[in-house]
Image: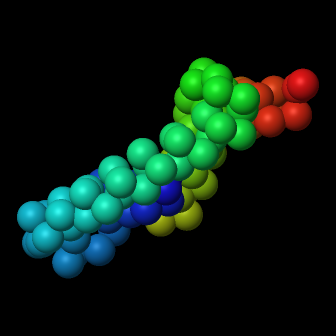
Amino acid sequence: MHIVIWIQVNGQFVWPWFKDNTLIVSLFGVPISYILILATKYIVAGFDGLLWPGRFVGFGAGMIVMVLFTWYFLGEGLTTKTLASLLIATGLVCIQVFWK
């Protein structure tokens, strides 16, 4: 979902169609929200009823997608600060998924 959200929000800086059709692009917010609600339901079930692990996984995944897509599509370099943030985000995801 973070990939879809990145495209929806930042597509205006990559593709002229997104910039010229913001109202149409914003209409995709409804199905995105619905899928996120379902994803939250399943991730909470997967973590034995706990909400916090899903939040950290979502944050970490969002950071990873942001770094990679912003670099790939917009050419924003991977600075030391960005790489450190990416490492921390990856660590958060790994802690939540693998630490039992």
Q: Check the image and report above or below for 39 versus 3.
A: above
Number of labelled discs?
Answer: 0
Residue 31 appears in the rendering: yes
Residue at 65%, 27% in the rendered image: 49
- Judge whether 63 appears above or below 4 on screen: above
31 left or right of 46 in image: left
Q: Nearer the viewer, residue 56 or 63?
A: 56
Q: Position of residue 77 (x, y in %)?
A: 57, 49
Q: Is residue 36 left or right of residue 28?
A: right
- Provide residue 95's location: percent of width, then percent of height: 81, 27
Which one is in front, 70 or 33? 33
Q: Splitting the image into 4 quarters, where does residue 99 fall?
A: top right
Q: Is residue 13 visible?
A: no
State the residue in front, 76 or 37.
Answer: 37
Judging depth in this view, the residue of 28 and 88 nearest the camera is 28
x, y percent for residue 9: 30, 54
Q: Quadrant location of the C terminus?
A: top right
Please say which color scheme the image uses.
rainbow
Q: Classify 15 as above or below 78.
A: below
